Amino acid sequence: MSRILSLLLLLTLPLVASSADKVADFTLTDLDGQRVKLSDQLKKGPVLLDFWATWCKPCLQELPHVQEIHTKYAKQGLQVITVTIDNPKSQAKVKPLVKTSGFTFRVLLDGDMQVRQMLGGKDIPLTLLINQNGEVVHRQLGYVAGDEKKLEALIVEVLKKGVKTSPPPAESKDSDK
């Protein structure tokens, strides 16, 4: 039995993002019917991407903390985007939940779970912190009370670093002539 578990663990290791992994670009529709492209959001700042569903209890526990992070760091450039994997049948519950909860972050629809699966699986909640270079700097599957404190510390670090750019080219000495 332990060999089977070890094998399963080894098979899932490639799904875990390392800090150097680039996230694949995608486009989804938000609750207002607007198409949202991840790469366009990354131009505005780092992105906190959170996958959830209306029927997921840990997700519903996590979302108020996601809202707090959005409220606290949006003016500093953090783009908070949540993605619901509710299927078309249960998507009717999403907008009322968002409104009654007072959530102001952007909510995208991934009812067929293509984007969630593209990112390695289907389990939720899944939270990704993506820097402006499109690199996943943090990946968290599941939610336990207190996880938001660690996440917030990472967000502060990413916001301080900003976009990593290469140094400007050295000026040629010939230009002085």
Image (cartoon, rainbow, N blue to C red):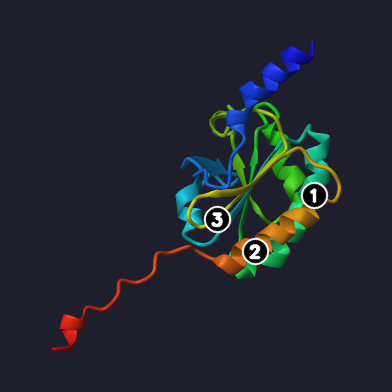
Depth check, front residue: 8 or 135: 8
Q: Secondary structure at mark 3?
A: loop
In the picture of the structure, the residue carrying the numbered disc 1 is 147
Q: Secondary structure at mark 1?
A: helix
Q: Earlier in the sequence, mark 1 or mark 3?
A: 3
In the picture of the structure, the residue carrying the numbered disc 2 is 157
Depth check, front residue: 114 or 89: 114
Mark 2 surroundings within 10 Å by alpha-carbon count, few (fewer than 14), some (14 through 19), many (20 or more)? few
In the picture of the structure, the residue carrying the numbered disc 3 is 131
- x 62%, y 69%: residue: 76
Left or right side of 97 for 164 = left
Q: Amino acid at mark 1?
A: Asp
Residue 171 sits above or below residue 84 on the image = below
User: Label 3 vs label 2: CA separation?
Assistant: 10 Å
Q: Secondary structure at mark 2?
A: helix
- x 74%, y 50%: residue: 99
Q: Earlier in the sequence, mark 3 or mark 2?
A: 3
